[in-house]
Amino acid sequence: MTALLALTTSLLWGLADFGGGLLTRRVPALTVVVVSQSIAAAILGAIVVATGGWGEAGPRLWFACAAGLVGPVALLSFYQALALGPMGVVSPLATLSVAVPVGVGLVLGERPGLLQAAGIAVAVAGVVLAGGPQLRGAPVQRRAVLLTLVAALGFGTVFALITEASTDVTGLFLALFVQRLTNVAVGGTVLAASVRRGGRGRPVGGFPWAALPALAFVGLADVAANGTYALAARHGPVTVAAVLASLYPVVTTLAARGFLSERLRTIQTAGATLALLGTLLLATG
């Protein structure tokens, strides 16, 4: 069950990243974040009301608030790092986020078996290679590396926090709702400040209302991924759940290949193969 839920997380996050990447070609990144998360928050609010989730309110929601504060900072740092590039370095480096939840699991006493440890090593190496790291070419700006490390630390922290935000499914809906409200508050504040400084809050031709379904998909896929990851980490070892959930860059790469006909480099193909091998080792271990 842990492996299935974590792999579902990878699928959802990978597709959300792919969709978000396409949308940011037409819509400012901050607007994509705020609108997609607002749609997700509205739907989650309806679910919380329908399931009576308010009754699950308690101290654990502070973990959800913290995740909501950290998430937008990590995402914006990641986008800025991608702008500085090269993407072939930034994307694989961001997968270091897996070190945070794995480290937390080890501190809490989890000890993966030999087969699982091998699977973790193989899967992480595969994810990094699947991003197509550029080992040659133009030098990478130090600021891009720093921003990527900030993003990785933030993503990993969200992984760890959302696991602690609830104890049951009803509480999880409430925790995800609180997280999204915090995301919108933080992202909206940054967006408003950016617009006041002369930044763009919408495309030149106006807000693309036809993109609302895609924005909704990105927001809901991201929420669902957070939910399936929390369930995966609760049902089994965090070390296993975190590594399998971190396979989402492979999904994004394959989606780009399937929908945009982007050609995979040899190193990316090798990485995707290693990631799948590591997944099999973890699932059988």
Image: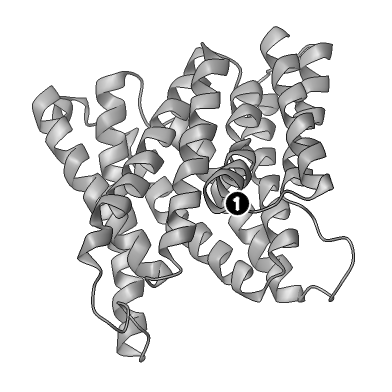
Identify the residue shown where x is 83% and y is 21%.
Answer: 118
Q: Position of residue 38 (x, y in %)?
A: 24, 54
Locate residue 78 relative to residue 183 in the image: left or right. right
Q: Which residue lies under the disc numbered 1?
A: 261
User: Residue 83: horizontal and vertical position, in percent?
Assistant: 60, 73
Residue 119 spot, x, y in % from top left: 78, 22
Whether 41 is drawn above or below 285: the answer is below
Residue 39 in view (yes/no) = yes
Report the residue at 50% width, 50% height from top: 18
| Residue found at the very far top of the displayed protein | 284
Q: Amino acid at mark 1?
A: Ser
Q: Secondary structure at mark 1?
A: loop
Q: Is residue 241 left or right of residue 213?
A: right
Name the foreground residue: 245 vs 114: 245
Quarter of image, res 149: bottom right
Q: Is residue 282 above or below residue 230?
A: above
Q: Is residue 111 something that shows in the picture?
A: no
**Badge 1 density bin: few <14, some 14–19, many ≥20, Cα 10 Å:** few
